[in-house]
Amino acid sequence: MFESLVASLGAVDILKQEDSGEIYVSDETLKVPDFRLVLKDGTQILVEVKNYYQKADAMQPFELDGDYLDGLVRYASVMNTNLQLAIYWAKWNIWTLVRPESFTSDNEKRTLNMLKAMQVNHMAALGDYNIGTRFPLSLVMHADKTKPRAIGADGSGMFTISSVELLCAGESITDPREREIAMFLMFYGKWSYEVVPTLIGDDIEAVEHRWLPETDNEQGFEIVDSLSGMFSSFYRFATQEEEKIANLRVDITPGSWGALIPDGYKGKALPLWRFILEPNYDPGTENLDP
């Protein structure tokens, strides 16, 4: 998933598996991380990827063997390259990219809680950002009034769709690019889904599929999700069948998700808010803010 995510965001020039192929090391304590990334500005980073599912305790910290982390750090030092750890918090569908010094020493273990990981998250360097818009987002299927559309005695009914309309906060979305963006936000974002029928008497007028945020902060918009979160939802949908992994590979066009919202985009019927989250400490030091 991480490999496909990074390629789809399009903020790196090169992504290479670092731990593939034969390797000879004189120091057996060195640990080879998963990937080497070359960013657009020429910066290289080594990335170790971890999948973490918090079971009973949804806020349980991520834990790593201290010797293992030290071995990764030593390998990065020998390669004169920075190391970062990409952690997928599976229960929350959240990616964080953190530096080794973000971890806390706990005897022979190194630990990191999710809230701190979010504070010192470097995913923006890979092209990630959060997206917000007005709500609700709606897909409305209008009934063909020339054909049967009545509700039966058992409460069920059939109708023929005459047209499909996309709406943002009640305003019709007609621009092709905005319709594409809206569909991605609907299907892969974190908003709650509901179905609302419109009836006149016993006749079906329309059926609205509606997506809403769980909380309205009365600011005129709400965050739908991050690009990385939406991509991960898409990836899970594409690789699973009946809750089982059916395929680990998804055909990805490099940069496709990063190009979903063009630079300089100005919304018409679909206004968007984009937030690039920077890590909450001075990149030149190891001092973390509380």
Image (cartoon, grey):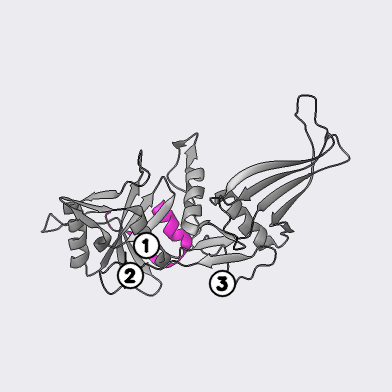
Residue highlighted by disc 3: 263
Above/below status of 98 relative to 155: below
Above/below status of 75 relative to 232: below
Label 3: how many Cα within 10 Å (few below 14, some 14–19, many 20+): few
Location of residue 79 in the rendering, given as x and y in whole percent from the top left corner = 21, 67
Q: Quadrant of residue 174?
A: bottom right
Foreground residue, 59 or 243?
Answer: 59
Which labelled disc corresponds to residue 96? none
Q: Residue at x 35, y 43 (%)?
A: 54
Location of residue 240 in the rendering, given as x and y in whole percent from the top left corner = 48, 39
Residue highlighted by disc 1: 119
Above/below status of 211 relative to 203: below
Q: Which residues are magenta?
A: 1-20
Q: Residue furthest right?
A: 146
Task: Kindly report the distance in space between the C-alpha atoms of the residues bearing marks 3 and 1.
Answer: 26 Å
User: Of marks 3 and 1, which one's residue comes earlier in the chain?
Assistant: 1
Image quarter (top left, top right, bottom left or bottom right) of the C terminus: bottom left
Location of residue 188 in the rendering, given as x and y in whole percent from the top left corner = 55, 50
Q: Amino acid at mark 3?
A: Asp
User: Of marks 1 and 2, which one's residue comes earlier in the chain?
Assistant: 1
Residue highlighted by disc 2: 281
Q: Amino acid at mark 2?
A: Tyr
Are the residues tagged 1 and 2 within 8 Å (C-beta)? Answer: yes
Of badges 3 and 2, nearer the viewer stands 2
- Element type at marker 2? loop
